[in-house]
Amino acid sequence: MVELLQDQQRDKNLIQDDLDRIIETATANLIQDKISQESFRTFLEAYKTTRDSIERKKIS
């Protein structure tokens, strides 16, 4: 997610698509008991913060 925040080259919609794929993977990992609910909640907070930051950022 940090790399997505730092990406200044691509359109923010493409970056958001990548972020959506990450949340899908995390959700699948939760369902498969590969990560705990607590870890998922922590990840979800980071996801929301990242998504909001990407939405606000201006890409030149």
Image: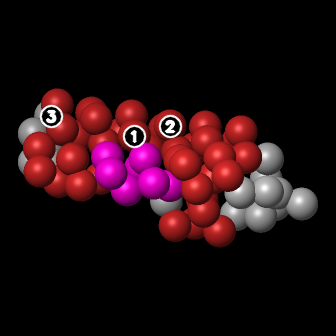
33 on left or right of 55: left
**Disc 3 target residue:** 32
Disc on res. 23: 1
Distance of label 1 from label 3 (alpha carbons): 14 Å
Point out the stretch of residues depicted in magenta.
44-50
> For the residue carrying disc 2, how many other residues have a C-alpha within 10 Å: few (<14), some (14-19), or many (20+)?
some
Q: Residue at x 70, y 41 (%)?
A: 14
Tell whether label 3 touches label 1 (CB within 8 Å): no
Tell whether label 2 touches label 1 (CB within 8 Å): yes
Q: Secondary structure at mark 2?
A: helix
Disc on res. 55: none
Q: Secondary structure at mark 1?
A: helix
What amino acid is at disc 1?
Ile
Q: Secondary structure at mark 3?
A: loop
Label the magenta part by its dominant secondary structure: helix
N-terminal-most mark, 3 or 2: 2
Q: Residue at x 39, y 40 (%)?
A: 23
Asked if residue 41 is among those painted magenta in the image, a careful observer would answer no
Disc on res. 20: 2
Distance of label 1 from label 2 (alpha carbons): 5 Å
Asked whether residue 15 is in view, the answer is no
28 on left or right of 5: left
> For the residue carrying disc 1, how many other residues have a C-alpha within 10 Å: few (<14), some (14-19), or many (20+)?
some
